[in-house]
Image: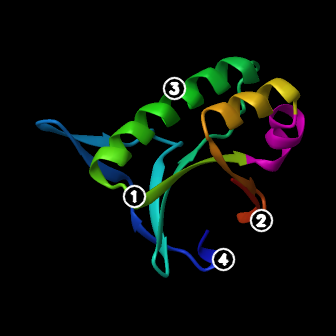
Amino acid sequence: MIKDGWVVTHDPLTVPFGTINLHIDLGAERLLAAEKGIEKIAVEVKNFLSPSMVSEFHTALGQFLNYQVVLEENDPERQLYLAVPIDAYREFFSLEITHRITQRFQVKLLVFRPEQEVIAEWKN
């Protein structure tokens, strides 16, 4: 993201949720917040390294939907993205069922190249 002109502003992003603060810190996979000009985003990074991409997708989608609700209520100008490696995108996210699910739930994707640490594509 930095190579694409983004400035990381929160790592992790802390979002109020009722009377508690939700610290979205997932260890190796974390929620980052960044700003580019006036555009604000939050990025949930997933590596899709487990043997079951379907299971990992279920977890990622659930987290994405939870974060989306919390951000809509507490930081509505910030757009949420799910970041996935380009290999996982080609193998799994290009499938018709995955495409239909991401469209239905309005999951914005950030496809990245892990080796080069660069963004390959933005999918809205």
Q: Earlier in the sequence, mark 3 or mark 2?
A: 3
- State whether residue 93 is above or below residue 119: above
Give SS at disc 1.
Answer: loop
Question: What range of the chain is rendered magenta?
Answer: 85-94
Mark 1 nearby-residue class (10 Å; few <14, some 14–19, many ≥20): some
Which residue does the image show at 36% across and 55% down from the upper left?
Answer: 76
Which residue does the image show at 87% across and 28% down from the upper left?
Answer: 96
Please identify, in this view, whether the residue under mark 2 or under mark 4 is nearer the observer: 4
Give SS at disc 2.
Answer: loop
Mark 4 nearby-residue class (10 Å; few <14, some 14–19, many ≥20): few
Which residue does the image show at 80% across and 36% down from the upper left?
Answer: 93
Q: CA distance from mark 2 to mark 4?
A: 10 Å
User: In this figure, which residue is indicated by the disc labeled 3?
Assistant: 62
Q: Check the image and name the residue furthest to the front.
A: 104
Is the C-beta separation of discs 2 and 1 under 8 Å? no
User: In this figure, which residue is indicated by the disc labeled 1?
Assistant: 11
Question: The disc labelled 3 sits on which kind of residue?
Answer: Gly
User: In this figure, which residue is indicated by the disc labeled 4?
Assistant: 3
Residue 55 is a magenta residue: no
